[in-house]
Image: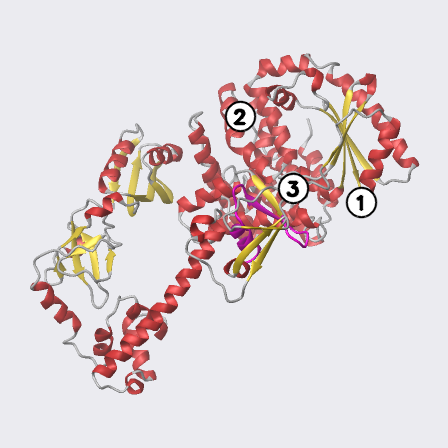
Amino acid sequence: MKTTDDLYLELIDKVNDNEYTKEEIDLINKAYTFATKQHAGMVRKNGDPYMAHPLNVAIIVAGLNTDAITVVSALVHESITHGSSNLEELKEEFGEQVSNIIESLMKINKLHLTDDSESSAINLRKILVALSEDVRVIIIKLASRLHNLRTKEGLDPELQVLKAKETKNVLIPIAHRLGINQLKTELEDLDFRILNPDLYNEIESELPVPRKELEEMLRETIDEISELLRDNNISFEIKCRVKSVNSIDNKFKNGHTWKNIYDILGIRIICEEIPDCYLIIGLIHSKFKPIPKRFKDYIAMPKNNSYQSLHTGIYGPENLPLEVQVRTKEMNEIAEHGVASHWSYKEHGTKAAQSIMEQKLSLFRTMIEDNVDEEEIKNTIDTEILSDSIYINTPKGDVVELPKNSTPIDFAYRIHSKVGDTTVGAIVNGKIVTLDYKLQDQDEVEIMTDANSSPKLDWLNIATTTQAKSKIKSFFSKQDRENYITRGKDLLEKELRKRNISIKEALSEDNINKLITDLKVANYEEILLNIGSLRYTPVYIVDLIYNNKENVEDAFLDKLSRQTSYKTNYANDIIVSGMDDLLVNLASCCRPIYGDEIIGYITKGRGITVHKKDCVNVHDLNERLIDVKWNERTETNDKKYISHIKVFTNDNKTQLMDIVAKATSRNIQMTSINEKNVNDRIIYDLLIKVSSKEDLDLFINDLEMLKYVDLVKRY
């Protein structure tokens, strides 16, 4: 067993290989000293010093060529949960990036897979990725799990199985999606050994030659190939492996037998330049007999996960089939480390691979920042992060990654929002196609634009990516804003002319500043926007300028008092007694939803605010209250309303997945989850979207049936 000193020296070797700056290395050493103090005297369940875990995690992530911040975060990632530190101290000692990474890791580590169901695994995977605003959080989580499975002997068998299932259902698919194959492959094999021990041993025993002998044969073959390459003055690295049991089992599941598995033995040669790759294949074929139809050129035609390499099959020692892979250093970084290699190859990585990795990182980093609701975030993860992708070429040779079923509209907006907004047509592989054409992997796409053109509303039905739809909606939102401002200006000036008031005099700088202060808006443009969108009437604005208290509100109240019947306006969720052209808002204090008993409150120049009838904020009000009711047709719409509930439990363990599962089964969307530990009991503060009070009551009833839930309260 390696001592912590041995592990530290191994880490320093990895750090030196990564060519960090002196300041970065000093920070890593500082993190090591800090973590050592935090874990002094602590022992893991398998008997190792506790510091062995953060050191091993740091070694794994450093081996992926990540940046120094990732290594520092790996060293201190247990300093709060298994130490006496806190986020404020980590921020002070190591900076905001490190403290943010550790905070996200702590959130992720509270999540537990509660059963074997696919839906639970999918939901947990979505939440895990959504919580990871920085992709380095996921990398550290994967590395931590890998070391835990390597040292599983300290865990009881049931916990081993639980961790293995969670790894299989949640972490391995994410590692695959990020292209971190170095971790993915070992995680799969360790998982397989825990979950299928009998089958694992059976496959191992059926290898044509015992694994140790196969490894010795490979080393002899490597010596032969190395001599051949040195004789031809080729700079190279060479590695070998015997295929993992899990990979062999996957071959069996795909219909292969021992006779047609040609890559049980594998050699990988890493060289400097692309021309060397092809030269090496030629030299190997001249010395070893090639297996027919086993040559594959993934350099000219990369796989859909950006993998590039040359593959060939030869007959190796004792005539056993042997797969040879040849690739450049950059290609190997992308193949083994995926997005983790972004930092080391940011400046000099291959153009196609760099472009794709930038796109992957961009999706992860902007997904949370785009101010979209939780449901849209989850949909984005499903359709764009965890789904299969296609790779589209531009005429200039760049590569763009898109989810399957994307259209030229998605491609155009992935290039640039300006390109998307001015798109008028698309040429795919030299042929003009319609904008709803489904792009295929490796298509070459050219977008035709016209500076005078603009998006069409029906593009929302054509686009599939969240990015494209968001940009289209943004365009029309901006266009609506401009139209409202123009209309507001016209309405206000018309009212002034009607009263024979000088426009220049009424809209003097002093008067405009008065309006801005009274209405608490940012600028004059906001006032015009509110008039144009009917939030304020021009009469109200003019009266406000001249301090006329006998204003439109009094006239409005008088008009309402003379109305007794409802006038239906199917454009609104709420029907106001006698009026169908008013701005109606739902109160944020009590958050009424369809099916609640409601009452309207006439605000000062801001339309009607609708409250629940039992809301304390309208309990003692009389004059400004008005009868309102729900538009019955709303029931058939897809409209959802925000509701606020708290779930009080009698347990101190995180049960988030149960709550998410109950919400999913009721088609209820989670928009915010806040977890608090009060007196060793967890309280969940939830903002959710529901269609009606009936749906909310059913959801609350579902939660109250959980054995660890004491009370569910709506706010």
Numbered disc 1: secondary structure: loop
Residue 257 falls in which quadrant of the image? Answer: top right
Nearest the camera: 442 or 520? 442
- Numbered label attached to residue 527: none
Q: Residue at x 60, y 29 (%)?
A: 187
First in sequence, mark 1 or 2: give its number: 2
Q: What x and y, as percent, mark residue 186?
A: 63, 29
Nearest the camera: 651 or 546? 546
- The CA distance from mark 2 to mark 3 is 28 Å
Q: Which span of residues is magenta-colored?
A: 393-416
What amino acid type is highlighted by mark number 3?
A: Ser
**Which residue reaches farthest right?**
231
| In the image, residue 57 lies in the stretch drawn in magenta | no
Is there CB contact under 8 Å for labels 1 and 2? no
Numbered disc 2: secondary structure: helix
- Numbered label attached to residue 306: 3
